[in-house]
Amino acid sequence: FFWFYLHIQHCDSMKIMLSKLKELKPTGDFYFEDVIIKICKGQDQELRAVNPPENFSNFGDLFIELQRLMIIGKNDDIFAKMDLYKTLASEQLYLEMKGEVLGVTGKKSEALDVIRQLEMLSTTQHVWPSRFAVIYMAIGDEKKAYEYLEKGIEERGLWMHMLPYYYPFYIKRNDPTFQAFMKRTWIN
């Protein structure tokens, strides 16, 4: 249920489900869930107060930590964690995050190089259009980002529901164009 509510961005229900999960597994590690609820609610101040784990053992926790760091503007910390992310994530996920980080930190030409790497990768495996969209939005090319998002809707793309949790889209969460787009992903 937690993931269902994450998909439809029902933050309060996510919090209730997390409480139930913690009751069932009181010693569990719920870093990802705790942070994603704060992102869902737009609680930037609370995100500053988060104490991340000393060691990350899975890409999900590290993914959400990197998004948290972008939201609170700790770019130096992001670059320090990218090598670890490369070891934990798939090549596609790593390239997407690398392109996003480069774009958000103003390294547009390097982010475009990552897009070219993803394009090369797409000749041998399927690359979700949302991966390109995240990077294009990170470099400020909204037109190109929405073109890829349209492709994502056409193919009922995986991970479209996660877009509001990526920093380039997180900052667009109140934008009517992005809100209308997200409604279309839920319908599809």
Image (cartoon, rainbow, N blue to C red):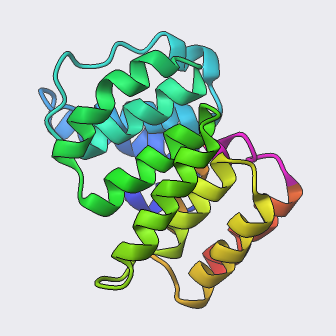
Which quarter shows the C terminus? Answer: bottom right
131 to 27, vertically: above or below: below
Q: Is residue 112 toward the left or the right of residue 85 in the image?
A: right
- The structure residue drawn at horizontal position 30% and vertical position 82%, both measured from the top left corner, is 125
Frontmost residue, 34 versus 17 = 34
Q: Is residue 128 toward the left or the right of residue 187 in the image?
A: left
The percent position of residue 58, horizontal first and vertical second, equals 18, 42
- Magenta range: 168-175
> From this viewpoint, which residue is outermost toward the right?
176
Per the picture, the main secondary structure of the magenta-coloured stretch is loop
Residue 170 included in the magenta stretch of the image = yes
Residue 70 included in the magenta stretch of the image = no
41 to 157, vertically: above or below: above
The percent position of residue 80, horizontal first and vertical second, equals 33, 22
22 to 103, vertically: above or below: above
- The structure residue drawn at horizontal position 60% and vertical position 47%, both measured from the top left corner, is 109
Which quarter shows the N terminus? Answer: bottom left
The count of marks equals 0
Q: Quadrant of residue 23?
A: top left
Q: Is residue 107 toward the left or the right of residue 81 in the image?
A: right
> From this viewpoint, which residue is outermost toward the bottom?
154
- The structure residue drawn at horizontal position 63% and vertical position 44%, both measured from the top left corner, is 108
- The structure residue drawn at horizontal position 44% and vertical position 41%, both measured from the top left corner, is 16
Q: Is residue 44 toward the left or the right of residue 115 in the image?
A: right
The percent position of residue 107, horizontal first and vertical second, equals 59, 37
The percent position of residue 92, horizontal first and vertical second, equals 33, 62
